[in-house]
Image: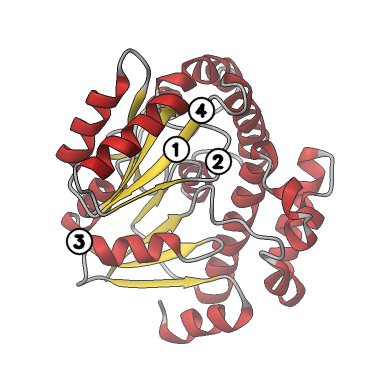
Amino acid sequence: MKMALIFPGQGSQYPGMGKELADNFTIVRQTYEEADDSLGFALSRLCFEGPECDLQLTENTQPALLTTSIAFKRLLETETGLDFSYVAGHSLGEYSALVAAGALEFGDALRIVRSRGRFMQEAVPVGTGAMAAVLGTDADSVEEVCKEAAQGDTVVPANYNCPGQIVISGQAAAVNRAIEIAKARGIRKVLLLPVSVPSHCALMASAGERLSAVLENITMKDPQVPVISNVEAKPYTEAGRIKSLLVAQISSPVLWESSVKEMVSLGVTHFVETGPGKVLSGLVKKIDKGVVTRNFDNLAGFKAVEGEGA
């Protein structure tokens, strides 16, 4: 049996995440304490208690999700000894995957993603960027809609999540034009997303440049297990490629559907979502109904995963 650990990105966070497991397992509690020490503020309290408005700030959301994901990964290792062959993460989750693979130190990753969140927010003034989910159609149709809607502005596919679910990103005016064009073409459902940052499009180029400067001072190691790249949907195992891929990722589309298909083609039959929520588990099942997915973010969920051996 080949297993992959998959790590969620922004949107999976909620106040209270990780608290029950931290109350019951020392390794989880210690991971949150390590994050508090690394960042110099009570991130754990923000995760466990909120308030939600502070947790939703991008520069807080990113280290909060990273910490929760790594706490859960450490719990899996210490309590179950499960062996995994690949790791992958959706957008921000790729940083969790790199920590899980031993390529990036947890403390370094925390500081990087806190800066990354701030850089992304500062790249585009609030209100001028937008993202929308386009449901029930194929990638070619979404790409055609974006081309027609652009009219000199930026609007592009940002997340190829699963069949029939693609997220677009860009300047608010262009995204709104794309929504109207999609509806006029009979596309079943288009939803404007409640986000303040138009991720994974060219508007994030300045954030990528600032991120590159931060990454210059970070030591990367060869991943101990292959990491699936968001940008290429292929595994990588060389430390020398990590920084350039992370910089490219911030303004490139997330190829999640292709990433899951790649892991399946490499023999993965079991996926364990390692972090809050179950967004990725749902996407994986839509991509390939034949695989086994598991997720947990509370004590009962973890006991179920532990009892089944994933």
- The quadrant holding residue 299 is bottom right
Q: Residue 195 carries which label?
A: 2
For image coordinates 44% across by 37% down, the residue present is 131
Identify the residue under disc 4: 129
Dot 4 and dot 2 residues touching (CB under 8 Å) = no
For image coordinates 19% across by 42% down, the residue present is 185
The amino acid sitting under disc 3 is Gly
Task: Compute the Cα span from label 2 to label 1.
Answer: 7 Å
Q: In this view, does 154 lie to the left or right of 52?
A: left
The amino acid sitting under disc 4 is Gly
Quarter placement of the C terminus: bottom left
Tag 1 secondary structure = strand
Q: Which mark is residue 267?
A: 3
Disc nearer the start of the sequence (2/1) = 1
CA neighbours of label 2 inside 10 A, class few (<14), some (14 to 19), many (20+) = some
Dot 4 and dot 3 residues touching (CB under 8 Å) = no
Disc nearer the start of the sequence (4/3) = 4
